[in-house]
Amino acid sequence: MWRKRFQIIVALMGFTLLIASLSFAAGTYVAEHPGGAVASRLPFYDASMNVAHVPPSAGVPDGLEEQFAVFWDVWRIVENDFFGETDRQAMIQGAIKGMVDALGDPYTQYIDPQQNAIMREDDSGGFEGIGATVDMIDGRLTIISPLKGSPADRAGLKAGDVVLEVDGRPVKDMDLIEAVSLVRGPKDSTVTLTIQRKGVPEPFKVSIVRAKIPLISVDGRMLSDQIGYLAIRSFSGRTVQELDKHLAELEAEGAKALILDLRGNPGGFLDAAVETVSRFVDQGPALWWENADGSSYPIEVKPRHTFEGPVVVLIDEGSASASEIVAGALQDYHRATLIGTQSFGKGSVQNVHQLRDGGSVRVTTAHWLTPDRHEINGVGLMPDIYVAQDDTHPELDIQLSFAHRVLRNRIGVPRHTPFFK
């Protein structure tokens, strides 16, 4: 089972996936790095793509003439003998998709021009959809995390929910991008999902009205006199600027300790994750990059002003990819205490190539490891202190309250200090 989400981008989405105009889908970015153009699944936010374009074909690869001859034999037979109209473009795209799917890797994918155009939409003010990150796990479209306050959140969707049908259409074993395309849609339109939930005997339907989802990367506030709170919702192109702004404000307000909330964060730009680590660690690798040939190299932190007080990081099953880079680094350096539940476990990387027909293909090429070289792909991060939320009282944030109590004891704040949730 897969699960057990320079400027390199790693949603490593990953996917966990979000699609622009959907907040329910998937996207991929790519950028330059000494190791080549690398990327992975991530929320499709407002960032330019620097993509390696495939050069013009030089013809049939040497040694494959006989195999390609069979392909063209079948092509001619179908065109000559098929009863009905043939769509050459659909046949070509189907052949490409079949070739890529034959590799057996759910994250090595061909994305046709129509779907690719959707994924590359750039709406800096936000996007329209239900507001949830998803992934295809064992052929099942699975909710990784609903975005806080989104239509999906208000409808009661939970991490781990499996989407069986979209408007009555089964999505099991469907390509992830295709399934996501069924869910996306304009604001004020309605989509009905058939949901299977652990512990609930029968599937049930949920109708959700799509909405405009604002892109807010970082939120910050004081929880009490000396304890600040920072929630990073995703690692986008704006994260570092917003993080520095909120961190400076919290320190100015007297924050001596900090809660960094990465729950439900599906990932994003790797560079933003490295910059975030650099606000708490002043030297050493933020992660290790491991290539398919076994070679590896460190990606170092970037020395900046660092927050030196005690830190707690909140994680859950919706924390994936770039958020796991941050949490894993702070855990390895003993710079923070991780509280919550086991994270998602997305540590693979995909190259993305834009194709001349407007489509794209992404190919898994690498894994990343934590600073102490821990493999998290399919495993996730285990918190230092396991604290689960109480589903019977969703209005209570037990994990946040516990983190506040831990920091209060650590810095010696009196018990009667008010907690401003």
Image (cartoon, rainbow, N blue to C red):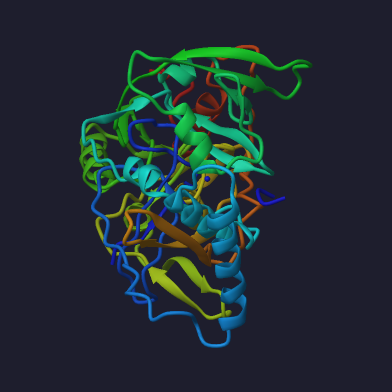
Residue drawn at (38%, 30%), measured in percent from left and top?
Answer: 22
- Residue 276 left/right relative to 145: left
Residue drawn at (57%, 15%), measured in percent from left and top?
Answer: 394
Residue drawn at (55%, 69%), measured in percent from left and top?
Answer: 72
Quadrant in which residue 352 is drawn: bottom left
Task: Specify the farthest residue to the right.
Answer: 201
Query: Relative to 396, is 341 above or below?
Result: below
Q: Give the image location of residue 371, x and y in percent.
A: 51, 65
- In this view, the residue in front, 404 or 7, is 7
Q: Give the image location of residue 53, x and y in percent.
A: 31, 67
Query: Relative to 363, is 341 above or below?
Result: above
Quadrant in which residue 200 is drawn: top right
Q: Where does the C terminus fall, quadrant-wise?
A: top left
Query: Relative to 82, is 391 above or below?
Result: above
Q: Give the image location of residue 99, x and y in percent.
A: 57, 62
- In this view, the residue in front, 14 or 79, is 79
Q: Give the image location of residue 269, x and y in percent.
A: 35, 52
- In this view, the residue in front, 78 or 40, is 78
Quadrant in which residue 187 is drawn: top left
Residue drawn at (59%, 68%), measured in percent from left and top?
Answer: 73
Report whether residue 144 is seen. Answer: yes
